[in-house]
Image (cartoon, rainbow, N blue to C red):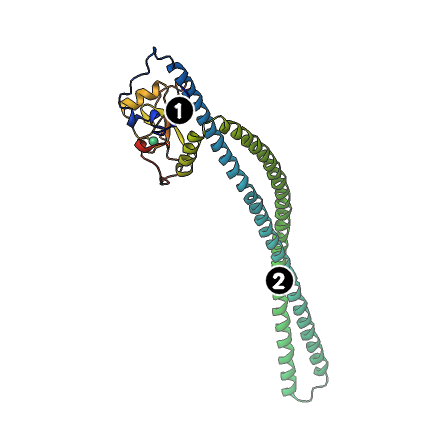
Amino acid sequence: MRLSATLDGKGLSAFDAESDPGAAPIPESMPNAVDFLTRMQTLIENLAKLQALELERSRLSQEMRALPAEVAGAERELAGAERQSAEASGALNREEQVRTRLEREIEGHRQKAARFRAQNDTVKTPEQAVAIEHEIAFATREMERLEDEELASLERTEEQEGALKRARTLVEDLAAALEKTRARTGERQKQHAEQLAALNAERERVRLEIEPEWLARFDRLAAARGTGIARAENQQCTGCRMGLRPQIWNQLREGQLLSCDSCSRLLYWDPAIPSAPKQPQPEMIPGAGRAIRKPGQAGG
Ligand SMILES: [Zn+2]
């Protein structure tokens, strides 16, 4: 019995529990039964392998897409530190300009006070003497006030120099980190591309070994559900966690490839994996259940 023969006419219904209510184990006496199950086993292995390859491909692709974001993140951090450094540097320059202005003003008041003191020698009236004393006192007070301002400015400069030093150190560190990130992501990009090329070659090879009808069905399910085939475990579909009817469970354990009543994924049983309770596995793409055929209509 050729496997593809079962795909004729009623589509894939030969493997479908809905259209095979007897679900009787294939009798040992049937000459092609062993051959049939061997072919089925090969098909299951190839489909499971194809799915593992697809999942690995999408994991690698996702990682590759995330790599430029890592570099961009490091670039943003560096740009932020460079901005801080430029701001600290700008603040220092402004503070120096403030002190230049203060020095000029202080010098102005000093000269004014000196001029008034010189005039003091030539005063004619007591009113003039009082007025000159007043001007000298004012200029002295202004000088003191401006000198206090200058001192405050020097204190700010000290703080700003500290901030500038820290910002420059940060810029250096982040620039070095960016270089490392660039080198690392570049290397990973290269490795991923090589792995992906190998996966693609292996995928093409496995696809060629799967009958086109099964491949089309797998692709359709994978596009809609994220995965096309699911392992049955503890009488559950691991794709959607729905319980399986005992009849289907039995057929699966005989080595048949069926489809889940609930999510339509192809279902198989792997005797190599022990039946132990496991963490629930969510659907690959939640809510992506569109255009899924009912198990009874599967195939074609
Ligand atoms: Zn399911």
The reply to whether discs 2 and 1 touch (Cβ–Cβ < 8 Å) is no
* Residue 172 circle label: none
| Residue ranking furthest to the bottom | 124
User: In this figure, which residue is indicated by the disc labeled 2?
Assistant: 153
| Three-letter code for the amino acid on which mark 1 is drawn | Ala
Query: Is 103 located above or below residue 88 in the figure?
Result: below
Give the side of residue 32 with respect to residue 85, left or right: left
Give the side of residue 58 with respect to residue 267, left or right: right
CA–CA distance between discs 2 and 1? 93 Å
Image coordinates for residue 50, horizontal then vertical, percent? 47, 29
Q: Residue at x 64, y 80 (%)?
A: 135
| Residue ranking furthest to the top | 29
Q: Residue at x 43, y 33 (%)?
A: 216
Local SS, label 1: helix
Q: Quadrant of the N terminus?
A: top left
| Three-letter code for the amino acid on which mark 2 is drawn | Ser
* Residue 5 circle label: 1
Q: Mark 2 or 1 closer to N-term?
A: 1
| Res. 26 image quadrant | top left
Q: Mark 1 near ligand 1 (CB under 8 Å)?
A: no
